[in-house]
Structures are given as C-alpha cells and as structure tokens.
Amino acid sequence: MRAEPGRHGSEFRRRRKLNDIQKALSRDPPDVAMLRRMAISEGGLLTDEIRCQVWPRLLNVNTEDLPPPPGPELRVDNKDYQQVLLDVRRSLRRFPPGMPLKEREDLQEQLIDIILQVLDRNRQLHYYQGYHDIVVTFLLVVGGPLATALVDKLSTHHLRDFMDPTMDNTKHILNYLMPIIELVNPTLYDFMQRAEVGTIFALSWLITWFGHVLSDFRHVVRLYDFFLACHPLMPIYFAAVIVLHREEEVLDCECDMASVHHLLSKIPQDLPYELLISRAGDLFVQFPPSELSREAALQHQAERTAASTFKDFELASTQQHPDMVLRRRFRHEPVLPEHGAKSVLTKPRTNRLVKLAVMGLTVALGAAALTIVKSALEWAPKFELQIFP
C-alpha cells in the first residue's frame, strides 16, 4: 500500500526538522539562531520534550542552576497572594480536560508558588491579572523548577513592561496595533477609526500571549514557540494579522464601537495559525519597529522600559546588536502622505525582497526569523479595568 504523497512529505519535513534541532542543540555553544528559526518555521518545535530543551536556550536560561523550591513562608503576609489565589482558582479551563482532580490541585499550588517566587525574587515587578495564564503554560510544558527559571527570565525581559506599577507602557504597546493595520489595509483602518473601537479588545491577547483566549493548548504552545523566538513586539504583529484576516467580518459589522468591539474581542478558534504566523513574520520584516518609530508623528523621550534589559539579554543570547527603541506614536497629529504611509508602503517592501534574495530563503517568515535576532524593543503595562471574566 503506497503512502499518500502529502503525508510522506510532511513526515519527511518533520524528521528533517527534528534532526536540525538536535544538531543545533549539540553544538558548543548551541546554535541559538538556528533554534529560533526552527521555532518560528511551520509546526514550531513539534513536541513538549523538545520545548523543554529549546525554550531555555531561547531565553538564555542555565538549566543546571534552577531555583530551589520555595518554603511555606513565601505565602505569609504576601501582598499578592490573595489575588493570585483567586486568579489561579479561576484557571480551570487552562488544564487538560479529564485531568484528575488531585493532579490539577497540585499543579495549581505549584502555579501559585511559581508566581510568588518570581515576584519575590524581583521586587520591582508587579503582578497583573492574566500573568497566571502565561505561567501555567510554562508549568504544563516544562514542569515546576524549570518553569520558575523560564518565567523569571521572561518576566524581566519580554513581559517586563506589563509588570510596571501602571498600565502606561501597555497602552503604549497597544498603540502600535492600528498603525500596522493602517499600512496594510487603509480601508479597514478607516472603518475601525470611524467606529471608534480603539484597541482594548486586544488587551487580553497581548498580556497573556493569547493564552487566555485560545481553548486548544496546541495552538497556545505553537504561538509561544513563535513569540519566544521573536522580538517582544511580535504579539502586536500577530494581533494585527488576526484583525486583518477578519476584514470581511469587520466591514460587515455596524460601524459602531459596541458592534466591532464585540466581534473582535471573540477570537475564532479555527484560525489558520501557520498562515497567520507567516504573515506576522512577513509584516515584521516589511514594517519593522524601527520603521514604525520613524513614522511616529510625535516622539517622546523614551522611559526606562524593557528595552534596556532586553538589550543585555539579546547580546548575551545571540551576540546580535539590537535595533532602535520604539517611540510612542500619537494618532492625533496626522502624518502627511508624502512623508508617511506612502514611503513606508513602498521602500520597506523593496527592502524585504532584497533581504529574501540575499538570504536565499523561500518565504518571508525565514527572513523574519533572522531579522528578529537582530531586533530590540520597547514595551509596556496596566489598565484599571476588569478585562477577564
């Protein structure tokens, strides 16, 4: 009986990827750039066993020096304990269906300890609602001790600005959503502007790396592969491609805030994730953060955000020099067409094609993987709103 050509080709690509990942891991030092490309490319890192090996490399975490388990004193008089406890108790759907009650309860206790331990080790960080959705993903994939180390590094780098005492920096990051949409689809952008929908619909996507809104754990960890390998602004690009993908649905809505917000705040569970990941990578290359920064109508002096610590992190893990720090983009002062959207829509596309040719890659996503290695960031955190049920 002959194997189906599609299945045979898929299995061959899978075996080749597994082999490439093992080669990258076996080098001394490990080939982090290759691991990033493997995490971004179709299918991601394939298995949780591989993620246990690769995620620490992507975050530059030493697996031989894991933090010891916390003692019971960690919860005593802890200012965050009650809120963390409430959030973890509400996290039932984040655990696999059919998991025995005792096992789930044990994991929930570990989840509480990981969160409190990271906060105790980093007193400058502030807990936010939704943080536990990210932490539980690491707990389920790699287990308690390693999850603590990975979340600690993630919290002081990629998630750093979500953990500020105010939401100012998170709002700043959300401000990059609409400019991306405007550059790709001005018609959709104009409709959303007339509806005055804003960007609050994407808040829970951003601060949980979509963990709170996706019901299939396979899709969650696939996105985590992608985000861990990328520039910390990549979740905003992914949010943008979701909105762009739903253009017809949005334009069919009544042009008012309530209707458009209601539609966009509910993510379909059957999205073509690999296609959207590829498009997000392509948009990152075509409209990189530095280009968005140059298009800003007003630039304010950058506050100390995750950019400063991420720079050190990137240099340590990849030996690449980071890109320019983003500046705040204000929409109330329009950019003139001859100096604004037109120039970004033409020149970056040419640059992207040059990059693809020079690198010898067949898809824009491959270019994104290499571009991301060289990138830096500016990010930020926290609305006084009840955004989760």
Image (cartoon, rainbow, N blue to C red):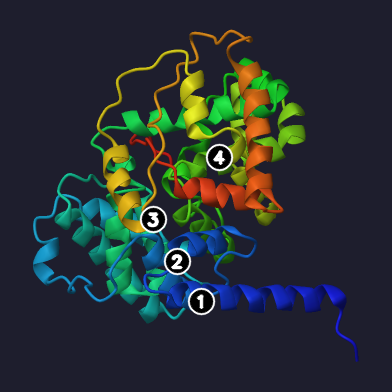
Amino acid type at image mark 1 = Lys
Q: Which residue is mark 1?
A: 23
Disc 1 + disc 2, Cβ < 8 Å: yes
Question: Residue 318 — which label?
Answer: 3
> How far apart, in angstroms, are the residues tagged by discs 3 and 4?
22 Å
Disc 3 + disc 4, Cβ < 8 Å: no
How crowded is the residue under tag 2: few (<14 C-alpha within 10 Å), some, or many (20+)? some
Amino acid type at image mark 2 = Asp
**Mark 4 or mark 1, which is nearer the start of the sequence?**
1
How crowded is the residue under tag 3: few (<14 C-alpha within 10 Å), some, or many (20+)? some
Q: Which residue is mark 4?
A: 237
Q: Which residue is mark 2?
A: 31
Mark 3 vs mark 4: give the one in front. 3
Amino acid type at image mark 4 = Tyr
> How far apart, in angstroms, are the residues tagged by discs 1 and 4?
30 Å
Up-down relation of residue 66 to residue 91 (above or below): below
Amino acid type at image mark 3 = Thr
> In percent of the image, x 68 and y 24: which residue is there?
346
